Amino acid sequence: MYFQISASIAEDNAELKKEIEFVDSMLDEAEAKSVYQAIQLARISRLDVNRIETVLDLYVVEKALSYVEMLKCEQCNTLAEFAIVDRAIRDEGVFECSICDGQIERPDFDSMDVVASYHFDPSKVSRATNAGAANSTSGDSDSNDNDRPQHHSDPSDLSERESRIVTELLLDCFESVDDVRNFASDSSARPFRQDLETKTLRSCVRSLIEQAHRRELLGEVVLDLERLASKKREQIVAIANHIEAKYEHRSQRFRKEISRLVESSTEPRFDLDQESFLEEATSRNPFLDLGGLRDWLDDAELRVCRVRGDVEDLGTGFLIAKDLILTCHHVVDSFIEESDREYLSVCFDQSKNTNEMIVGVDPEWDIPHSKPSVADELGTDDPPAPDELDFAILKLSKEIEKERGIFSLHDTKRLPLEGDPILIAGHPGPNAPLQHLKFSMASPGFVGLNDNETRMIYKTSTLKGSSGSPVFNRKFQLIGLHHNRGEQGEKYYQNNRGIPVVKIVSHLQESKWKSTPEIVALLNG
């Protein structure tokens, strides 16, 4: 659990363990004050909405969340606090929406549905402590370290014996803290290498184990040891299999790498008392190259941006030329024909090497675009017309430095095979402003195409704000523009949809903008 209060709630409500873990993980994503609704979280998690609401109410009782009744503006869907609307109507006779200037009067107000919202302030909730770091000493010679009792609230966590076995394996592979840090920088531990405790070798190893297990990456981290200690292959594979069996899902990389190692060695065995490890490793599913994934994440961090209106984030976009941004038409539809484009801009997040950067959109640029279909807006499965591709190309007021690079519209014309992983980088909601850049992946991910091949269908998760995100295949090649949700299930949406890049290129080649110098250069790649 990421928060102390989550572990406390889970202790008294074991039957809601999955829902508590999910809510805890969502709260961990919040980097500022955030608002959640049970129905949204249920759709994301595919858990029962009533059970999610029960968990949210438990957090309210413990004062980790605050409950606020909201009303939704029927014109723009903006939420406003019920108490504020009520006060305005009582005092002024009418409430005016701050976004669209729509008005709510007393008769309408009485008939509107109240939306239950849960507000979260991350600064007011205590995070779980790092037990490994807290118990560390200033030397490596503490002979009682291995025998110190460990307390876990999660039954799937490592037992004392398991923790000891993994610790000793890692200590056998490293001679110094620097060895651990170098290993973490080039392994599955890379996302959290900066969080490692580094006072002593033992505390650093313990911290690595704790951080990796909390993210369900410990099996992969152990597997990465094989390149450092190939003579311990059988032991490493056995321990990695055993740990991975505790998790509810497997990464594609883990299963592929396990298969490779098992094929090139005798059957791995290791004494774990009465606890057995995973006995079969036969998956042949595709996996993602770690180096390619690292490069792709670095590129996305530099090239994907938020598209902003006057006072709010509208969605996501990304660089396809030094001064061109591809996004969805419905993200910027109010700016296509109107004259107030001086309020339209894009914002690139701060990264490890760059500061946040906001760049205005050229107001004189005739925006090449294609509208969405009526079926898209109504949520039906009627095929869009071939020219209803929901895209817009914005020109920036200045060229972006060459170092950021671009995502090419000509990376590939080949669409994935059914079941192939699909990756998306964007700025999802439900928080406002939109969250910092997030990465989502599904494997199996690609479902197929709609009837007239104008829409790609995939399982990868998105939220409002993800519109305009780039969609990639397992080789990190740009294949689509994320556009909309897909089919509605009983409780949640079953898939999402995007526009194939090849369709956008074909449309531009036949459009009235095909002779525009910037588009000519774009099409020539």
Image (cartoon, grey):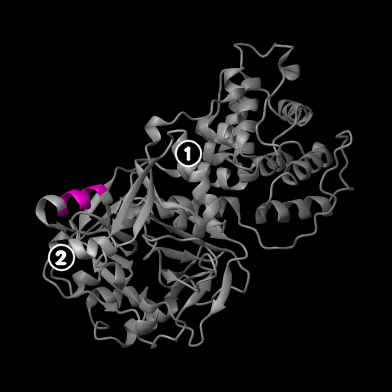
Residue 97 is left or right of residue 77, and the answer is left
Q: Residue at x 44, y 86 (%)?
A: 383
Q: Amino acid at mark 2?
A: Arg
Element on which disc 2 rests:
helix
Q: Closer to the camera, 260 or 37?
A: 37
Q: Closer to the camera, 290 or 2?
A: 2
**Disc 2 or 1, which lies upstream in sequence?**
1
Residue placed under numbered mark 2 in the picture: 341
Q: Quadrant of residue 448?
A: bottom right
Query: The N terminus is located in which quarter?
Result: top right
Residue 242 is left or right of residue 297, and the answer is right
Q: Which residues are magenta?
A: 83-89
Tell me if residue 496 comes above or below residue 114 in the rendering.
below
Q: Would residue 147 be visible to someone looking at this image?
A: yes
Query: The C terminus is located in which quarter?
Result: bottom left
For label 2, count other residues whose C-alpha is less than 10 Å away and answer few (under 14), some (14-19) or many (20+).
Answer: many
Across and down, in percent, residue 118 comes to 39, 46
Determine the CA span between mark 2 and mark 1: 43 Å
Indicate whether residue 86 is drawn in magenta.
yes
Q: Would residue 436 be visible to someone looking at this image?
A: no
Q: Amino acid at mark 1?
A: Tyr
Across and down, in percent, residue 392 comes to 29, 72
Indicate whether residue 509 is drawn in magenta.
no
Q: Residue at x 34, y 52 (%)?
A: 434
Residue placed under numbered mark 1 in the picture: 59
Residue 295 is left or right of residue 353, and the answer is right
Q: Which of labels 2 and 1 is toward the front? A: 1
